Amino acid sequence: MKNFWETTKHKLWVLWYIFSTCCVLMKRAFLHDLSKYGKHEEPYFRKYVHRLKDVEYGTGHYQSLLSAIKPALEHHYENNSHHPEYHENGFDDMSLLDQIELLCDWKAATRRHKNGSLKNSIEFNSKRFGYSEKTKKALLKTAKEIGLF
């Protein structure tokens, strides 16, 4: 009987910690990309973001749009930890929560491109950000587990 209560107590603590983690993720969801509404980013995104729907991710045309909003992107990356550019050592310095938010961000971004694919984004960005094959597999597995594809 003692084992039952010890196991139950353990399960309740795990429940509490997972719930607490979910609360942190919910806070991140509410605060996500608020800097895009500010004076440093909003004018650029207002002018260019709607054009993304007509371009293929990673193409020259896509890169030219990014160049046009470079000041906004630099400000955005400097103020949002879910981007590898925020961190001194890029992707390697990101927490697991940063990575989960980034996966959700990438998935949402795929919805505005005509060839959007989270799997392709994870592959493309492995080269861009230099994360390992092991990390790429973990991102793919996590994305699948949380229902992003």
Image: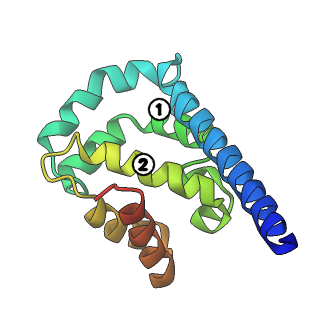
Q: Single out the residue that lies furthest toward the right.
A: 2
Distance from disc 2 to disc 1, alpha carbons, whole Å, reads: 21 Å
Mark 1 crowdedness (10 Å alpha carbons): few <14, some 14-19, many ≥20: many
Q: Nearer the viewer, residue 109 or 146?
A: 146
Disc marking residue 72? 1
Residue at 42% over, 78% down: 137
In the image, residue 105 above or below residue 89: above
Q: Of helix, strand and loop, which one carries label 2?
A: helix
Residue receiving disc 2: 104
The image quarter in which residue 111 lies: top left
Q: Nearer the viewer, residue 123 or 86?
A: 123
Q: Of helix, strand and loop, which one carries label 1?
A: helix
Mark 2 crowdedness (10 Å alpha carbons): few <14, some 14-19, many ≥20: some
Question: x and y percent of residue 70 in the render?
Answer: 43, 39
Q: Nearer the viewer, residue 73 or 25?
A: 25
Q: Single out the residue that lies furthest toward the bottom.
A: 133
Residue at 54% over, 57% down: 99
Residue at 72% over, 61% down: 11
Quarter of the image where the N terminus is located? bottom right
Disc marking residue 95? none
Q: Nearer the viewer, residue 103 or 42?
A: 103
Question: x and y percent of residue 40 in the render?
Answer: 53, 22
Quarter of the image where the C terminus is located? bottom left
Question: x and y percent of residue 118 in the render?
Answer: 29, 59
Report the number of numbered marks.
Answer: 2
Left or right of 30 in this view: 120 = left
